[in-house]
Amino acid sequence: MDSAEIVREVDGIAAEPGTLAERAEALLAQLQRVVRFDAGWIALLPPDQDEHVSLARVGYDERVSGYLDSASVLGDVELAGLRRPRRPIRGCDMPFPPAELPGWADYLAPAGFRDGVTAGLFTPHGHYLGLLALHTEVADQVSDVARDLIGLLAAPIAFAVDPLRSMATVARLVHGAAAGILLAPSGALLPLPGLPGHRLLAPGSGVLVAAALQLAEGGPYASFLAPAQGTDGAETVRITVLAAPRELELFAPAVVLISPAGDLHGLSHRELQLLGLLVTGASDEWIAVAMGIATDAVARHLDRVGAKLVASSRTAAAARALRLGMFMPSSFFVRD
């Protein structure tokens, strides 16, 4: 077993493109060089969930697979101390007999497994991501050297299958992004690797409310403008909302990014607000009330906005504003 070569191979898999499942399958294949296992499993625990999600699983029967997909695994992880960073454990490394671990006694041992090694997977900041488990039908199959090498490989394996890192790759599609946040399935906010947070992305902020509304209405991508200070001040920033690829939806359904506003085509803060009403299909009367202007003045304002957007009608102006993200959602300045 060439440990240095295996480490290089695992690092290479972590750097390759592809889905989380594809990388996990390649990692399991590589780990056969460390432990000749009969069954193996790489799984992640989505935020705010109590059931792991399998990325790659081989060699387990239906009954054991059902256990691995259940919330019972998390209880066993807690009992074994794998929820906190530590050295991988074999049966002989546990502080109590393996038969006292429900999952081993009720599922793994009856399925014929006699040995194994399990490692928790963590982010560089110590956040629990999930598990790597390898099981063998022969006792004493996992040597001290193999266990320690699994421990060395746990960090690059976690890096390879970290879904938040994959979301950070999606975020890099937005040029000039200066801050960002991930939305968990529960609505909780998660840090985005590689970018700082921002006060506009704090829990309960108007930007996040508008982002959720725009994403729900516009599909996998939305872009709009927001007041930089969270007020009606003239300075604006661009907000971009990207839905996660399907394989990442369980972990972080969307990323919200802040970047410079870019070319505003000469549109004033008030005109951007007007466009925020126009894209909702608001009538002239409602625009007049919301903007605090006379109804007969709305048409003149729309003409100026249309000229700046090179749009021949209000419908064309609304369509162009949506396409360019050149509007400020009315939720920022219209109160019920």
Image: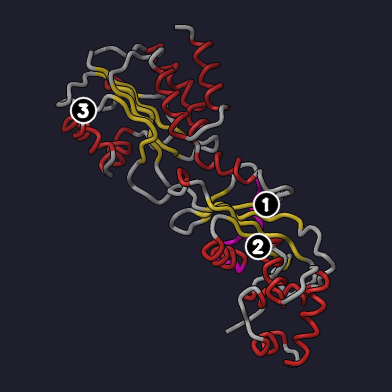
Residue nearest the viewer, comparing 22 with 24: 22
Q: SS for tag 3? A: helix
Q: Quadrant of residue 43?
A: top left
Q: Is residue 101 visible?
A: no
Which residues lie in the magenta part? 195-206
159 versus 3 height, above or below:
below
Q: Which residue is mark 2?
A: 200
Q: Is residue 47 left or right of residue 218?
A: left
The residue at the far top in this view is 1
Q: Point out which mark residue 108 bears.
A: 3
Q: Main secondary structure of the magenta part?
A: loop
Q: SS for tag 1? A: strand
- Name which of mark 1 and mark 2 comes first in the sequence: 1
| Tag 3: amino acid | Leu
277 versus 21 height, above or below:
below
Q: CA distance from mark 3 to mark 1?
A: 45 Å
274 versus 263 height, above or below:
below
| Tag 1: amino acid | Ala
Q: Which residue is mark 1?
A: 179
| Tag 2: amino acid | Leu
